Amino acid sequence: MKLILCADDFGQSEAIDQAIIALIEMDRLSATSCMTLSPRWTLAAKKLTPSIRKKAAIGLHLDFTHFGGAISHPKLVYLSLTRQLSKEKLQSSIHQQLDAFEAGIGTAPDYVDGHQHVHQLPVIREALLEVLSARYQIKLPWLRIAKPPLSDGFKGIVIGLLGARALNRKAKKLGFVCSGSLLGAYGFNGSSAAYLARFRGWLKEVNTDEATPVLMCHPAIDQTPVNNDLIYPARVREFAVLSSEGLSKDLASISLVKMP
């Protein structure tokens, strides 16, 4: 059974970056998504060495709600659903983020997804597909489709309804490879034991999808709390579980891969 185990938010903070690099070195991750508008991106990118790149896919975590000229996620969703976003401005930002990725890493991204799944919203998905199709004609990056299974509850359903099917359909028509179900959605609540139980539940979903699913996670090491990181306690719990010795048994029957 194949699974892409992906850590989001690389570049957001040192605590997050340290955790992700450690997990990649432990063969507990097969992908990480980068926030290239982060003020510390140039420094963070240096951690993505050739040896790390051999172990994990490195993607762009498209961002409109955290760094740069960010707006709140609810406002972005409203503006996208009501078609009030400027495609030209969106494409300019997408190019900016891709330029920063290429400057930091030296190559195009292996894949693209979105911070808070913004890449699949109306207008944004069209702008993104146009940019990627024009920019990477020889080799398109693969795309993460944010469509959680029904077992992930209300939050998962909402994430999927914000454009998963439309992005998947449009992207495949243009020749993009797309991932399968998105696992890992929850309310960032509960204990480490509760996260482990959730993680084991997500692993049971791996063999139910024709396309390779992605299990997203958001780890960070335990240090001084990072300002404005509302889910930092959950990040620390996730890292504790993902780095634990016992997890190797849970992953024994899973083949972690870098692309769908």
Image (cartoon, grey):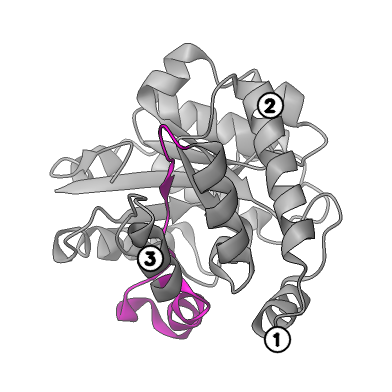
* Picture disc at residue 21: none
Q: Which secondary structure, mark 1?
A: loop
Q: Name the spot of residue 260 as percent of width and height, x first.
A: 28, 46
Residue of label 3: 168
Choose mark 1 or mark 2, whichever is in front: 1
**Residue 8 visible somewhere in the drawing:** no
Q: Which secondary structure, mark 2?
A: helix
Instruction: Assess whether residue 157 is covered by the magenta stretch.
Output: yes
Q: Which residues are magenta?
A: 137-164
Residue type at mark 3 is Asn
* Residue at 34% over, 29% down: 27
Q: Nearer the viewer, residue 160 or 235?
A: 160
Tag 3 or tag 1, which sits nearer the N-term? 1
Tag 3 or tag 2, which sits nearer the N-term? 2
* Picture disc at residue 82: 1
Q: Nearer the viewer, residue 15 or 134?
A: 134
Vertical side of 93 occupied by 180: above or below: below
Instruction: Assess whether residue 106 is covered by the magenta stretch.
Output: no
Residue of label 2: 44
Q: Name the spot of residue 8 as percent of width and height, x first.
A: 55, 47
Relative to 29, is 7 on the left or the right? right
Are the residues at dot 1 and dot 2 in contact (C-beta closer than 8 Å)? no
